[in-house]
Image (cartoon, helix red, strand yellow):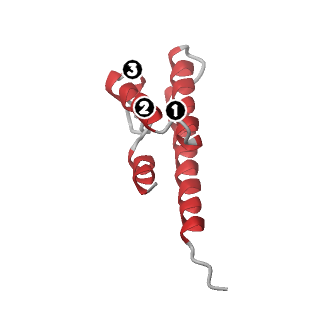
Amino acid sequence: MKALLLLLLTVSFGLRAEERAVNYCKDPQKAAEWEKHLTDTPEDPLIIKLYALRVGLCKMVDEGKVELKEAIRIWDIEHARSVNERLLDEMKHSRKRTL
């Protein structure tokens, strides 16, 4: 479980809000990394959500339905939310009841 938490903290959509945004949606290595994460943890709802979000945002950027910077913003918000959710779950499950 801790390895998965580390994964969520280190794995990114590949899009970063920089001065010149880079679209890593077209990077085959990033796509392969996400395929592996999904294959390794096919029942993890947070990985499924992030994978689906990445695929959907990439498709929308490719089709010109969403600007790259907006996709980056959406990803950053949802990725952070997912990491926080996982951290809270980890904290709840690791607490020892003393009463």
Residue 23 appears anywhere in the view: no
Are the residues at dot 3 and dot 2 in contact (C-beta closer than 8 Å)? Answer: no
Q: Residue at x 39, y 31 (%)?
A: 36
For mark 3, does the 10 Å Cα neighbourhood hold few (<14), some (14 to 19), or many (20 or more) residues? few
Amino acid type, mark 3: Lys
Q: Residue at x 45, y 31 (%)?
A: 39
Viewer-side residue, 9 vs 20: 9
Residue 45 place in picture, x, y as percent: 59, 41
Q: Earlier in the sequence, mark 1 or mark 3?
A: 3
- Mark nearest the camera among 3 and 2 is 2
Are the residues at dot 2 and dot 1 in contact (C-beta closer than 8 Å)? Answer: yes
Amino acid type, mark 2: Trp
For mark 1, does the 10 Å Cα neighbourhood hold few (<14), some (14 to 19), or many (20 or more) residues? some
Are the residues at dot 1 and dot 3 in contact (C-beta closer than 8 Å)? Answer: no
- Determine the image quadrant of residue 2: bottom left
Q: Kindly identify which residue carries mark 3.
A: 26
Amino acid type, mark 1: Tyr
